[in-house]
Image (spheres, rainbow, N blue to C red):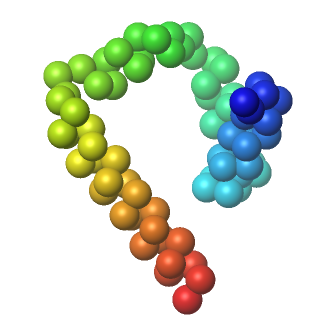
Amino acid sequence: MITDTEIKLKGFRALATSLGNIGAERFIALIQREPFDYTKWQRDLWDKKNVEEISRKAMEVKKALAEQNFGADA
């Protein structure tokens, strides 16, 4: 099982990779300023979506990431 510290480190690395160090810091600052209810967000995120729709979206994201990673290696 992954520890909370490992999750934080991996999360920041992902943010920094995507947004750069300054963008990642800005993102974290923005998130900390606003109240956030993860449970409500998660419930609303999948509201009115069936398993097929969620699966289709997941496959689209997986394909896009694979294409992005393939393009980075070329």
Look at the image and tell me in which quarter the N terminus lies: top right
Q: Quadrant of residue 47?
A: top left
Is residue 30 shown above or below 36? below
In the displayed structure image, the side of residue 2 where residue 40 appears, left or right: left
Quarter residue 42 falls in:
top left
Please indicate whether residue 47 sits to the left or right of residue 8 in the image: left
- Location of the C terminus by quadrant is bottom right
Image coordinates of residue 20 in percent, x first then y, are 70, 55
| Residue 60 position in % (x across, y down) | 30, 56
Q: Quadrant of residue 31?
A: top right
| Tally of marks | 0
Horizontal side of 50 relative to 7 (left or right) equals left
Toward the right, the furthest residue is 5
As rendered, which of 38 and 63 lies closer to the eye? 63
Q: Residue at x 57, y 79 (%)?
A: 72
Res. 26 in view: no
Vertical comparison of 43 with 73: above or below: above
Using the image as rendered, state which of residue 17 and residue 23 is in the foreground.
17
Res 60 visible: yes
Name the residue furthest bottom: 74
Q: Residue at image x 35%, y 15%?
A: 43
Is residue 35 placed above or below 12 in the rendered structure? above
Q: Residue 35 location in percent, x, y? A: 56, 11
User: Where residue 54 sits in the image (x, y, percent)?
Assistant: 26, 38
Left or right: 24 as drawn, with respect to 35: right
Residue beneath the point at 63% across and 37% down: 27
Q: Residue at x 41, y 18 (%)?
A: 41
